Image (cartoon, rainbow, N blue to C red):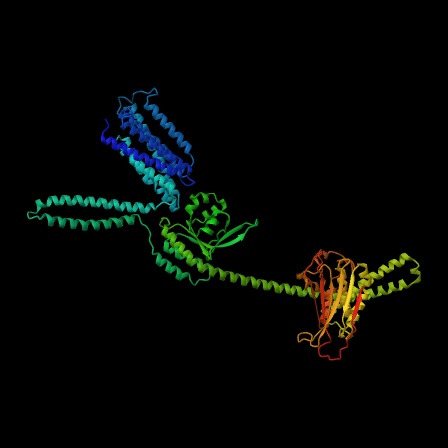
Amino acid sequence: MIVSADLLFVALLAVESLVYLTLAFQVLRQRAGQEEAASLLGLYALAAVLLGGFEALWRLDLLPLTEEIVWRFQTYGVLLLAVLLVLVNRAFLRLPGRSVWLGLGAALFVGVALFSARALPLPEVFWPDTPYQTSSARLSFFILLLGWTMFLAAAILTTRAAFRRTRQPLHRNRLSYWLPVFLLLSANDVLILSGRNAWGGVLRLLAVWVMTYMLVKHRLPDAHRIFRETASVLLGIALLAGAYGAGYVLLGSLPALLPDYDPFLGGFVVVSVLVVVCLALFGMLRRLVYRLLPVESYNPSQTLRDYSISISNILDVERLATVAVGLIIEAMDIRRGFLFLVDKDTDLHGRVTYRLRAVRGAGERPMRVGVLSAAGPFARFFAEGHRPLLQYDVDMLPEFRQGPASEREWLSSLDTEVYVPIYAKKEWIGMLALGAKSSGNRYTDDDLNVLTTLANQTAVALENARLVENLIRLNQEIRQAYQALDRANRNLERLDQTKSDFISIASHELRTPLTVLRGYTEMLLEDPTIKQNPYHYQTIEGIHKGTLRLHEIMDSMFDIAQIDARTLELSWQAVDVPELIRSVSASMAAAIKERDQTLTLDLPALPAIKADPKTLRKVFQHLLSNAIKFTPNGGKITILGRALPPNQRDLPEGGVEIVVADTGVGVAPEYHDLIFTKFYQPEEDLNKHSTGKTKFKGSGAGLGLALSRGIVEAHGGRIWVESPGYDEVTCPGSQFHVVLPLRRQGESETVRISEGARLKL
């Protein structure tokens, strides 16, 4: 018949089974990273449920077994769960060798079972007729007890070694939760092995709940604080129990000691004295516990106020790092800390990265620059998370464990525990990396909130310091640039002077031999005997043409040399500009016809100007020659002109403007000024030889436009080009403008008006 106590026990086992199944379900849904430990703990909970179910069926008389057999089955369960505990523990700590322990446990379990079932040919009694005489049944129990002790000790020692090896307080805090697990399981198993009632394995259920909490919860409450408060409560309970017992004894003995004893007054006095003594003792014991298990404390408000005042006016980055990190280290009793500046950059493959460089004070060792990929988990967390990151999270969370190995290695090399990002205008600009506390305690949520506030206060000072640093660096770069520019200008001046010297020397030294060569070739061409021999005549004629071309180049170089030396002598006289341009155009008729181009000259009646007709003729020859050269076959060239009214800037008495327009390839805007420099050649023509004066895009000496500008400016005028751009397909064309004053300033003569000029070729 089932008694009421057994029914209550079965009900307790049913509730425990439901709790076990709930815990198993919760742990199997555990976050990624501890899948194996979760599976093994689920298996542990299932084994505990089966053991409880077996005992429940026995108590309900559904299993006709003796109490000895049920107890032996429970002892086997204790050994099985001890083996599973070792496996769960090693999986939790991510330690290898679990298969070895599983094999060892299976061998021990099978051996004990065979020994107990007497399946082996062994004697009934071991060591008979000696003080150590033992039956086979008792020996099998001793072997089982030894195996249970070995596995439990292995789990405890493994956890202790991991605790001593770990320096991170949060990891140590997580390992501390194994202490109540081992205490609860040891107490539960000792009760079972000693044959006493284990209350349905309630202590084992509590241990499984603690292990489930460790796996499901990422950041566990501070075990140090829990142990301290638990110790205080237990001491308080013990003190109250002692005071209650002392009061009970004292109140019972007072009537015999005092003949006139008043129970009410005596009870009041005894209770009052005991309350005062208990309060005093409880205060002393609490202070003793807090001294043995200290928790550091600081004033966050005072820390924030001192920090804000100290860094508000610092504009030097190195001093800011020293002061800021020093204040945090002093306030929170931290071993080490660093301030990093964050620079957004792009690597060689075009990927966005963040470079973290430590700000070092004087005498500090240099630190390796960290590079975090913008697409990686760490940079994404810092740039978007806006909250501190713990090294514990880096070690435990799967998203960080799967991050780039180089980034994890760099963070680990800092030997710090918390990384606090610094933001300015929602941009990640810096980071505080802080090491462990000297007390060995963890960073609490309050600590992280204070650090986040300090980082926000640092942002303004850091942004100002970085602006000053960038300004200083920019000023240094500007000074260096000015120095480099000054050196370049001096080099250019020397180069330009060298070019001018070369032009001057070459033009002077070559003019005489070229004049001689030209004279002799002309004499040979006029010799009747040479004319009678076509081959000799053609040869000498080619020499003569080349000589004329070279003589023309030497004349241009000579003029350039005079312009550079400001010794160009002009023969001033009245010049009919339309007639001069008509004459130049007529001389180019053969080249225009050869290129199948159209030249339109449409000049109105213009006032005569005071100028040097010889040099001015060279200007329009070069402009017209360039128009022919850079205009495709079949193109059009137009020469227009107009009179300009007087102005106060550069034409006090007025002037004329001539425009040579073409439908050629045009000039790129960035070259509008460059084409008027000496020896300028387009890049594609730099290595070409001279290809003629009028051939399409033919190469030349690069002196024509430079000479034209020198001559025009020597006359007090201006020359420039207007063109939408360079394009050999659409041919946008160019317009070269020449503005010449009527006369030199200070002269005043009657202005003669020309008849204008019109021509079409």
- Kindly identify the residue that appears in the image at 40 percent across and 54 percent down: 452
- Residue in view at x 93 percent, y 59 percent: 532
Residue 515: where, in percent of width, then height? Answer: 83, 66
Q: Nearer the viewer, residue 369 or 241?
A: 241
Quadrant position of residue 718: bottom right
Residue 621 is at least partly visible in this image = yes
> x%, y% of residue 719?
71, 68
Quarter location, residue 319: bottom left
Q: Measuring from the top left, give residue 322's x and y in whole percent.
A: 43, 58
- Residue 713 vertical position relative to residue 163 in the rendered view, above or below: below
Number of marks in the rendered image: 0
Relative depth, front residue between 345 and 755: 755
- Is 485 placed left or right of 383 in the picture? right
Camera sees residue 693: no
Q: Is residue 10 left or right of residue 470?
A: left
Screen quadrant of the N terminus: top left
Quarter in which the C terminus is drawn: bottom right
User: Residue 456 is drawn in which quadrant?
Assistant: bottom left
Q: What residue appears at the point 73 percent right and 75 percent down from the top-left corner?
A: 742
The answer to whether 240 appears left or right of 664 in the picture is: left
